[in-house]
Image (cartoon, rainbow, N blue to C red):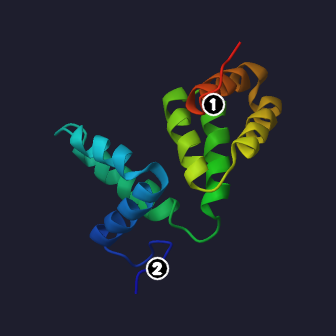
Amino acid sequence: MTRPDGEGLTDEQRYDQGMAVRRAVLSDAHVDRADAATTELTADWQDFITRVAWGDVWSRPGLDRRARSVAVITALIAHGHHEELEMHLRAAVRNGLTVDEIREVILQSAIYCGVPAANSAFRIAAAVFGEETP
């Protein structure tokens, strides 16, 4: 039996589970681009993030994908990981968050992550969601 938390799975099963979640959250197109860009240098990294990030952590039953997206967006804002933020804003919508809810997450992050970080996040969100920025 495949467990949603990855416990008792082989590395291959964790990879397969992770790949399914990764594709559902990030999109087939994104994952296909990442796979196509994989080199000898990055192959172990791609395997690792698929098994661990997606097969273990994102597959755990304790939070739904909406909640995981809120946590990820906030962490990315806090650490200034703009490229990843752009990707995970799109993923958040696939995970069921509305643009209005994402706006609230970014506003909330301003208090705990800082106004400049939230300002950058709003700029990125406006670009992702096709809105004009002043």
Disc number lying in front (2 or 1) = 1
Residues marked 2 and 1 touching at CB (< 8 Å): no
Query: Would you name the residue on which mark 1 appears?
Result: 125
Q: Is residue 40 above or below residue 60?
A: above
Q: Is 116 positioned to the left or the right of 108 in the image? A: left
Identity of the residue furthest to the left in this view: 40
Mark 2, secondary structure of its residue? loop
Quadrant in the rendering for residue 102: top right
The x, y position of residue 106, in whole percent, is 74, 35
Q: Is residue 60 above or below residue 120?
A: below
Q: Is 38 positioned to the left or the right of 80 in the image? A: left
- Residue drawn at x 44%, y 72% is 6
The x, y position of residue 117, in whole percent, is 69, 24
Mark 1, secondary structure of its residue? helix
The x, y position of residue 20, in whole percent, is 39, 64
- Residue drawn at x 75%, y 42% is 100
Quadrant in the rendering for residue 8: bottom left
- Residue drawn at x 79%, y 40% is 104
| Label number found at residue 3 | 2
- Residue drawn at x 27%, y 68% is 12
The x, y position of residue 27, in whole percent, is 42, 51
Callout 2: few (<14), some (14-19), or many (20+) C-alpha neighbours within 10 Å? some
Disc 2 to disc 1, C-alpha distance: 35 Å
| Label number found at residue 87 | none
Q: Quadrant of the C terminus?
A: top right
Q: Is 21 positioned to the left or the right of 112 in the image? A: left
Callout 1: few (<14), some (14-19), or many (20+) C-alpha neighbours within 10 Å? many
